[in-house]
Image (cartoon, helix red, strand yellow):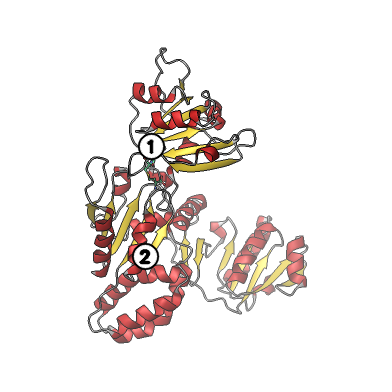
């Protein structure tokens, strides 16, 4: 370790910055964020710094640096573009044993500033020892993306309970286990979801009980259309905390890989012919698992509230008083549209878009045809594959031109994606001759013609020449 990391208390501490440009400004902002009293030495200031000086946010000493100015300072920063001046500042500070940083010059510095992830009171500092600052910034960007914005709230909340937890758990190991279960469980989620009062009550309850059993919760998580890149940070975080995961067949196996290794996996899918678990049983299973104190992950393809029965599942939870949260996912219509290069709305083609399902319990298609066949709109059909012929016929019968462009997108967003385009009249033949299988979406409307130009993600398979009135992108 070339540098020893510490966190310095700078509230009201006098700090000197030499230089009045943009580099100085960035350092001054950081020092101010930590509560320092900043003095700036520079013959001139940028407009912004000048304003800060006028408002009393910093003290400006106009003119050139004189070594005596470092006296009494807690920290010194040299941010001029003149190396001799920076050298002078560095020497003066070192003569007084004051830590000094010369921006971008580790040789002249006795300390370096890290890249910072600020979730105060939680602060993370990353350093490459001055060797490759860009690398430290890359690490910082990664950390930013995996540390939820709510962690600051969580840190502040935890600090409030520090002494109580210490008093309750004398044993260090027990205390650590307690904190782990709090910080990785429903209680922490409640804090980050802005339900601090409920979290306080639960915390008090757990501290008061003799046998500490964490309460369970259900996370209803949308996993997106299949490509793991399209998960949300929140989904990923909850996937990595789960004790048990309930999943169905739409979720690609790569996604299940991302669930915590030790989590128990329960398949509750509904392959069309074999209904493995009735919806009612899934709902009750979640209630039972959460009542046992488990963190239950209900992983859904796409978005849980879009043709996902998410509503029914959490209704049962709510009735049983089980805490739950819902994480939206990219619904397959949005995923397919983007990955096929088919904008769902477009000023030249469609002013509205409607998502419908082509699947009915009793096998009939009962849709609002007069509305769906109006011009200037896009219709996306979920679960429409088996009824495609009936759907296309109904569109035409209710007045949609038979040559209306149509696309079917299979395994959208995944490496297996196929996009086939045709018209209302050719689609059924297209589906059968290409052997299109579930999962697939049908998009109806003239926006489909844009795919030719806008498709950027596709696996090209050559369409046989015997397929008139259709093309493959
Ligand atoms: N809640 C899901 C939809 C579940 S219904 C969502 O928001 O996407 C299941 C239907 O979604 C499938 O029949 C298919 O029409 C569509 N679907 C889901 N994933 C898909 C994918 N990767 N490619 C194409 N269609 C998909």
Q: Which residue is mark 1?
A: 414
Find out if the beta carbon at label 2 lies less than 8 Å from the nearest ligand 1 atom. no
Mark 1 neighbour density, 10 Å: few (under 14) some (14–19) many (20 or more):
many
Q: Position of residue 237 (x, y in %)?
A: 38, 58
Label 1 secondary element: loop
Tell which of 337 and 406 is nearer to you: 406
Asked whether, in this view, residue 25 is left or right of residue 419, the answer is right
Residue mark closest to the camera, 1 vs 2: 2
Label 2 secondary element: strand
Which corner quadrant of the image does residue 84 belong to?
Answer: bottom right
Which corner quadrant of the image does residue 199 belong to?
Answer: bottom left
Tag of residue 281: none
Residue at the location (65% across, 73% down)? 70
Residue at the location (25% across, 52% down)? 278
Asked whether, in this view, residue 44 is left or right of residue 92, the answer is right
Mark 2 neighbour density, 10 Å: few (under 14) some (14–19) many (20 or more):
many
Residue at the location (48% across, 67% down)? 123
Q: Residue furthest top?
A: 465
Q: Is residue 79 visible?
A: no
Find out if the beta carbon at label 1 lies less than 8 Å from the nearest ligand 1 atom. yes
Q: Position of residue 465 (x, y in %)?
A: 42, 12
Whether residue 286 is situated above or below residue 10 in the rendered picture: above
Quadrant position of ligand 1: top left
Tell which of 154 and 52 is nearer to you: 154
Whether the residues at callouts 1 and 2 have beta carbons within 8 Å, the answer is: no
Q: Position of residue 399 (x, y in %)?
A: 54, 30
Q: Is residue 303 visible?
A: yes
Q: Which residue is mark 2?
A: 324
Whether residue 311 is situated above or below residue 56 in the rendered picture: above
The Cα atoms of the two marked residues, 1 and 2, are separated by 29 Å
Q: Position of residue 160 (x, y in %)?
A: 43, 81
Which mark sits nearer the N-terminus, 1 or 2?
Answer: 2
């Amino acid at each position: 370790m070339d540098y020893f990391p510490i966190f310095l208390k700078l509230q009201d501490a006098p700090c000197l910055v030499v230089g009045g440009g943009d580099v100085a400004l960035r350092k001054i902002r950081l020092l101010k964020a930590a509560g320092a009293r900043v003095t700036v030495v520079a013959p001139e200031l940028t407009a912004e710094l000048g304003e800060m000086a006028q408002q009393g946010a910093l003290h400006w000493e106009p003119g050139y640096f004189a070594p005596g100015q470092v006296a009494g300072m807690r920290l010194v920063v040299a941010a001029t573009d003149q190396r001799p001046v920076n050298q002078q500042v560095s020497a003066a500070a070192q003569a007084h044993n004051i830590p000094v940083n010369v921006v971008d010059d580790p040789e002249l510095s006795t300390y370096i500033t890290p890249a910072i992830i600020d979730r105060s009171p939680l602060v993370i500092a990353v350093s490459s020892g001055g060797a490759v600052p860009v690398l430290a910034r890359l690490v910082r960007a990664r950390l930013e993306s995996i540390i939820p914005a709510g962690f600051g709230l969580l840190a502040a909340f935890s600090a409030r309970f520090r002494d109580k937890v210490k008093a309750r758990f004398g044993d260090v190991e027990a205390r650590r286990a307690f904190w782990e279960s709090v910080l990785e469980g429903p209680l922490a989620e409640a804090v980050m979801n802005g339900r601090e009062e409920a979290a306080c009550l639960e915390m008090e309850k757990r501290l008061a009980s003799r046998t500490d059993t964490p309460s369970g919760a259900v996370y209803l998580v949308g996993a997106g259309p299949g490509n793991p890149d399209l998960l949300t940070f929140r989904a990923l975080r909850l996937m990595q905390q789960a004790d048990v995961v309930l999943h169905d067949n739409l979720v690609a196996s790569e996604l299940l890989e991302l669930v915590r290794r030790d989590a128990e996996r329960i398949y509750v899918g509904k392959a069309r012919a074999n209904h493995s678990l009735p919806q009612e049983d899934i709902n009750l299973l979640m209630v039972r698992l959460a009542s046992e104190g488990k963190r239950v992950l209900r992983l859904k393809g796409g978005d849980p509230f879009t043709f996902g029965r998410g509503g029914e599942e959490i209704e049962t939870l709510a009735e049983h008083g089980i805490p739950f949260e819902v994480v939206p996912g990219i619904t397959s219509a949005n995923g397919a549209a983007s990955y096929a290069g088919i904008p769902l709305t477009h000023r030249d083609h469609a002013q509205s878009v409607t998502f419908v399902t082509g699947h009915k319990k009793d096998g009939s298609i009962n849709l609002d045809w007069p509305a769906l066949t109006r011009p200037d709109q896009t219709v996306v059909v979920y679960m429409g594959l088996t009824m495609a012929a009936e759907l296309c016929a109904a569109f035409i019968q209710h007045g949609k031109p038979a040559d209306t462009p149509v696309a079917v997108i299979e395994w959208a967003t995944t490496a297996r994606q196929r996009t086939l385009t045709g018209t209302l009249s050719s689609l059924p033949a297209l589906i059968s001759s290409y052997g299109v299988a579930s999962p697939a979406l049908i998009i109806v409307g003239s926006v489909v013609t844009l795919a030719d130009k806008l498709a950027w993600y596709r696996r090209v398979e050559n369409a046989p020449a015997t397929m008139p009135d259709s093309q493959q992108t």
